[in-house]
Image (tube, rainbow, N blue to C red):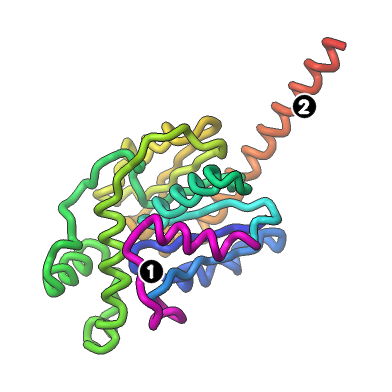
Amino acid sequence: MRLFCFPYGGGGASIYRQWNKYLPNHIELIALQPPGRENRLLEPAINSLSNLVNNILSALVDWLDKPFVFFGHSFGAKTAFETTRELRRRNLPEPKHLFVAGQAAPHLPLARHCFHTLSDARFLQAVKKQYKIIPQAVLENEELLSLVMPALRGDFCMSEQYVYQKDNPLNCPITAFGGDKDPEVTQDRLEAWKHETAVQFSSQLFSGDHFFVQTEPQRVINALLQTLNHFDKKNLLTKLLVEKREDDRR
């Protein structure tokens, strides 16, 4: 099975680097790397969610030959959700499971003021205060900061200008993870993801703030694996019961 991981706003593939040591051998981790960051730093950043999804699908299309699941954190959860929707529209293989973390259900409004309309100085101050995702070394290096700003601003712009389009619920189970000290993503805003799936939904809170995924990687991965095992067994039981009913009719 393949596990595709979508980074949070302004983040890159490296945020999932340590996950491999906690995953069993049968799960292949593929961390997505959007343009404008890390080893793609010099590529133009994307500031349209539809363009980002198209970019992702172009990269993924040759990797959908095995069962796979999506995991997205924060803005990455919205991206994973919209990517799943686009796979369905194109009649391509869909994830067996969608894991969303640190993100309220997509139909809910933002729980704070928008940042992307602020001046550079105020934008950086707001992001640093709320999320603490910009390393101090980057903040103190004007040249490096000028390189990372387009991707950071672009991600916040896409997230804050996101317009939810009502559609049929997804055909895959959804599991929503949250931090019990995250002021933006409260339990009720997390639970609202249940409306986006036509099958099973579950949720779990972890000790931590918005970035519990980084502070508690092993616990998050254990919960992910347990959820997959639970739903796999439940789906197998349902299949066996259906087959038994058909046998009884004969």
In percent of width and height, residue 204 lies at 45, 43
Q: Main secondary structure of the magenta part?
A: helix
Task: Say which residue label 2 marks.
Answer: 240
In percent of width and height, residue 31 lies at 53, 66
Mark 1: which secondary structure?
loop
In percent of width and height, residue 154 lies at 29, 66
Q: Quadrant of the N terminus?
A: bottom right
Q: Amino acid at mark 2?
A: Leu
Q: Amino acid at mark 1?
A: Gly
Q: Is 28 contained in the magenta span?
A: no
Asked if marks 1 and 2 touch (Cβ < 8 Å), the reply is no
Task: Specify start and end residues of the magenta stretch as a single range.
Answer: 37-62
Q: Is residue 249 visible?
A: yes
Q: Which residue is at a point 31% across and 78% down the rendered structure image?
A: 148
In percent of width and height, residue 128 lies at 22, 69
Q: CA distance from mark 1 to mark 2?
A: 43 Å
Q: Which residue is at a point 56% across and 47% down the rendered structure image?
A: 90
Mark toward the start of the polypeptide (1 vs 2): 1
Task: Say which residue label 1 marks.
Answer: 11
Give the vertical position of 248 relative to 26 (above or below). Answer: above
Give the vertical position of 233 relative to 143 (above or below). Answer: above
